[in-house]
Amino acid sequence: MANVVKEVKKAEKDADSIVEDAEETERELIQDAKEEAEDIVETARQEAEKEKLEEMDRFKDKVSEEKEEIIDKGREEADQIREDAEENLEDATELLMEKFRSEFL
């Protein structure tokens, strides 16, 4: 009977040890999973930040191209206005000269 009690106590002790080992393994697995999840979240955050910066660079490039196109178009229009103004000035000068000649000469 004493042997049976010893075996039961040993079995209980072994069972307690198994439970403690299982709980420690569970804590370690949970901690590992949390760390892995944090790594995944950080990697995703870094990738999102990188994509955001790349998208901003593409947007800046597009805006810069459009700005240059607008500036070039404005320069062309300004050049055309200058040419038209010079032609009008020449025509106005000639008209005034003719009028002056016809009235005073």
Image (spheres, rainbow, N blue to C red):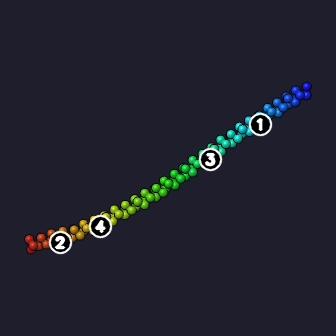
State the CA–CA distance, disc 1 to disc 4: 88 Å
User: Are there few (<14), some (14-19), or many (20+) residues within 10 Å of tag 1?
Assistant: few
Decide which of 87, 102 is in the foreground and name it: 87
**At x 89% / y 28%, what residue is drawn?**
4
* Amino acid on which the number 1 mark rests in the picture: Asp
Q: Which residue is mark 4?
A: 80
> Which quadrant of the view contains residue 36?
top right
Q: Label 4's element?
A: helix
Q: Which residue is mark 2?
A: 94
Evaluate if marks 3 and 4 touch, with contact meaning CB atoms under 8 Å apart: no
Instruction: Give how far across and how far down residue 28 sits, in percent.
Output: 71, 39
State the CA–CA distance, disc 3 to disc 2: 80 Å
Q: Label 3's element?
A: helix
Q: Nearer the viewer, mark 3 or mark 1?
A: 1
User: Are there few (<14), some (14-19), or many (20+) residues within 10 Å of tag 3?
Assistant: few
Q: Which residue is mark 1?
A: 21
* Amino acid on which the number 4 mark rests in the picture: Gln
Q: Nearer the viewer, mark 2 or mark 1?
A: 1
* Amino acid on which the number 3 mark rests in the picture: Ile
Decide which of 7, 93 is in the foreground and name it: 7
**At x 18% / y 68%, what residue is drawn?**
92
Q: Which residue is mark 3?
A: 40
State the CA–CA distance, disc 3 to disc 1: 28 Å
Decide which of 9, 73 is in the foreground and name it: 9
* Amino acid on which the number 2 mark rests in the picture: Glu
Q: Does 39 sit above or below residue 68?
A: above
User: Is residue 25 rendered to the left or right of residue 88?
Assistant: right
Instruction: Give how far across and how far down residue 50 sits, in percent.
Output: 55, 52
| First of labels 3, 4 by sequence position | 3
Q: Does 84 sit above or below residue 54?
A: below
User: Are there few (<14), some (14-19), or many (20+) residues within 10 Å of tag 4?
Assistant: few
